[in-house]
Structure formats: C-alpha cells, structure tokens
Amino acid sequence: QVQLVESGGGLVQAGGSLRLSCVASGRAFSSFLMGWFRQAPGKEREVVAAISWSGDSTTYADSVKGRCTISRDNAKNTVYLQMNSLKPEDTAVYYCAARPGYLASYQYWGQGTQVTVSS
C-alpha cells in the first residue's frame, strides 16, 4: 500500500509562486511514475504534469508549460511541483498520484492541497 500526502498549497496573488510537495510512504516509490493533477470547482480533474521513475522524462499540460516544473527526489520519496507566474485560473485542489509501471492508470492518490490564486 502506498500513501501520498501533499503539502504546500495556499493563497497567493497572481504572478506569485508556490511549491507543492508530495511525500510517499510505502515501498517502491522509485519505480512509480508520478503525476500532479488538479480539479477546479465544477470542472473535471485534469493532469498538470507527470514524471518518469528516474526523473529523466517529464510532461506538462499546455496550460502550465513554461510556468511549472515537476521534479522528484527518490531518496526522499518526494515529488515536487514548482509553480510560477500563477494565474487565477490555476485555482484548484491539486493532487499527486502514483502509477506503478505495470499499470496503465494511476492507482494511488493523495488527499489534495488547495491552491487559490487571487487576482
């Protein structure tokens, strides 16, 4: 079993920055693909960024490209999302998720952390 705990959310003005963290407990973190998702009120959950088990490969949603950076520290069982130049439309609950390499979908989810960007 893997547990994910996010932190780092909060209230920030437009143009500001936040760094989200997600700590994983349990085994085999370094073998998981990790992702950050978000869900705004009344909207579907969407992927924000993902990172391979080694950290060598990353992908981003078009809406955050150039503003966000996903990274991971396997020694600390932690994945990060650095968000810069935040916009009000980035307001959402942000979730991290883990996907074992043998599965096609994310299996483990955190409880989420609220990010609110004021204009």
Image: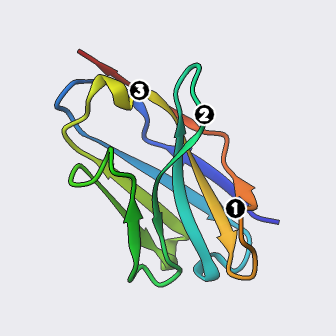
Q: Along the polypeptide, which appears first: circle 3 or circle 2?
A: 2
Residue that label 2 marks: 44
19 over 72 or under it: above or below: above
Looking at the image, residue 50 sits to the left or right of residue 107; the answer is left
52 over 95 or under it: above or below: below
Quadrant of image for the C terminus = top left
Q: Secondary structure at mark 2?
A: loop
Marks 3 and 1 in Cβ contact (< 8 Å): no
Pointer 2 local density, CA inside 10 Å: few below 14, some 14–19, many at least 20: few
Q: Secondary structure at mark 3?
A: loop
Q: Position of residue 83 (x, y in %)?
A: 29, 46
Q: Along the polypeptide, which appears first: circle 3 or circle 1?
A: 3
Q: CA distance from mark 1 to mark 2?
A: 16 Å
Type of residue at label 3? Thr
Residue for point 27% across, 53% down: 65
Residue found at the very far right of the displayed protein: 1
Q: Secondary structure at mark 1?
A: loop
56 over 69 or under it: above or below: below
Looking at the image, residue 75 sits to the left or right of residue 65; the answer is right
Type of residue at label 2? Glu
Quadrant position of residue 31: bottom right
Residue that label 3 marks: 91
Residue for point 56% across, 20% down: 41
Q: Nearer the viewer, mark 1 or mark 2?
A: 2
Which numbered circle lies on residue 85?
none
Q: Nearer the viewer, mark 3 or mark 2?
A: 2
Pointer 3 local density, CA inside 10 Å: few below 14, some 14–19, many at least 20: many
Q: Position of residue 77 (x, y in %)?
A: 55, 70
Type of residue at label 1? Tyr
Residue that label 1 marks: 106
